[in-house]
Structures are given as structure tokens and as C-alpha cells.
Amino acid sequence: MAQDTDVPLTIALAEYEHLRELSRAVHDQSAARFTFFLAVASAATAVSAGLITTGSPDGWVRPAVLAGLGVLVLLLGISVFARQVELNDRGRRYAVAATVLRTYLARRAPDLTAYVMMPTLDDHGPFAPEPFRRHWFRDLVSQAGMIALLNSVLLGLAAALAVLAAGPPWLAITVAALVVPGSVAAHLRVIRRRIARSADRVGTVLADRRLASTTG
């Protein structure tokens, strides 16, 4: 006698569990990279503070070491920022995929829909747990946004020091005041453009597969 197996349900549950594992892996990778970057930045700051306060070594060695540390942290920051944007995008797509599967499960058992508290495509408002369109400040305080702030501060400091070598202090301060917000805006633009591109792709997939909300 053949087993009475609900193949579609089995596949859906297995896929949902797989998405949970992928989302957890993305979260862990993102947290690990952010923590590593903060550790490197903190260590570089401590070394720089030690060189400045002790006044040694003399001559060109100290500025060269400080510049090298700054370049190292900035390059690492750019790399980690790019990876964080990629991981965040992947996490959002996994979240949407999980939402689609929850919608399938809820539509299979309409009587249980009221007890499914996580969002589905049939709920009013944004279908994703994390809306694609949100206020820019939310992106700024994310992990990628915090890395963007640190990168921007380093760029502003580098620009100020470069101007200070041949110009007055007020000009260096002015340049830094322009570079920092400009760099932050550029970083945020990268984040939000990636989010918008993901939203377009997800919307296209949902439309092609006719998975739009049935609530109208």
C-alpha cells in the first residue's frame, strides 16, 4: 500500500526550513564581519592614540604609521561595507521567499490563517517582514550604515590632513565638513539602490508567478 504522503506540503516545509538555515547563516556572517571590522578599527584607534600621546617614534615614521593604519582600516571598511550590502540583500530575498511559502501554507489551511502572525502576501501593507522602502535613517543605523559612517569619518580626516599640510586650519575643517556628509550620502545611495533593485526583481517574480495578494 502506498503511503499517504502530501508531497507538496513536504516540499514546502523542507524549503521553509532550508530558508531558515540560510537566513541564520547570513545573520551570523553579517554579525561576524561587523564585529571583526569594529575590532580592527578599535585596535587601529588605540595604536594611533598611543603614537600620538607618547610622541614616539620621531620624524616621518609616526605619520607614516598613522597613514598606513588609516588606509588599512579604510580599505577594510570599503570591503566589509560591500559585503554587508550583499548579505543584507540576500537576507531580504530569503525573507521574501519565506513569506511566499507562508502564504502557500496559509492558503492551504484558511482556518489557520488568523493564527499565523508572521506576514503573508495576503496581508495588507508591505508583504516583506522588512519593507523595501523605508526611511533613510533606518539604513544609516544598520550595520552597513555604521560602517559607512566610519568610512566617511576616515575620508574626512584624510582630506582634512591633506589640506592642512598646505592650507589654513579653517579650510581643512571646511573640507572635512563637506567630505563626511558627502561620503555618507554616497554610501547610503549604494545601500538604497541595492534595495530598490531587489524590490524590482522580487516584484517581477511575484507578478510573473501570479503570487500577488488576493485581498485586493
Image (cartoon, grey):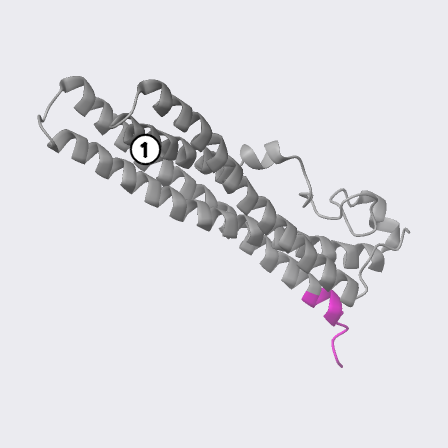
Q: Residue furthest left?
A: 58
Q: Is residue 111 above or below residue 181?
A: below
Q: Amino acid at mark 1?
A: Ala
Q: Which residues are magenta?
A: 1-11
Relative to the observer, which residue lies in front, 55 or 2? Answer: 55
Name the side, left or right, on which 182 lies relative to 36: right
Instruction: Quarter of the image for the N terminus: give it.
Output: bottom right
Q: Tell me the residue at 26%/32% (across/down).
A: 44
* Quarter of the view holding residue 169: top left
Name the side, left or right, on which 99 lies relative to 56: right
Relative to the observer, which residue lies in front, 144 or 32? Answer: 144
Residue 73, position as x, y percentages in the image = 31, 39
Name the side, left or right, on which 208 lies relative to 31: right
Q: How many marks?
A: 1
Secondary structure of the residue carrying numbered label 1:
helix
Residue 145, position as x, y percentages in the image = 51, 37
Q: Residue furthest bottom?
A: 1
Q: Which residue is mark 1?
A: 158
Q: Is residue 190 above or below residue 60?
A: below
Q: Residues within 10 Å of mark 1 (few under 14, many from 20)?
A: some
Residue 31 inside the magenta-drawn segment: no
* Quarter of the view holding residue 129: top right
Asked whether residue 140 appears in the rendered view, the answer is yes
Q: Tell me the residue at 45%/49% (across/down).
A: 82
Q: Residue furthest front?
A: 167
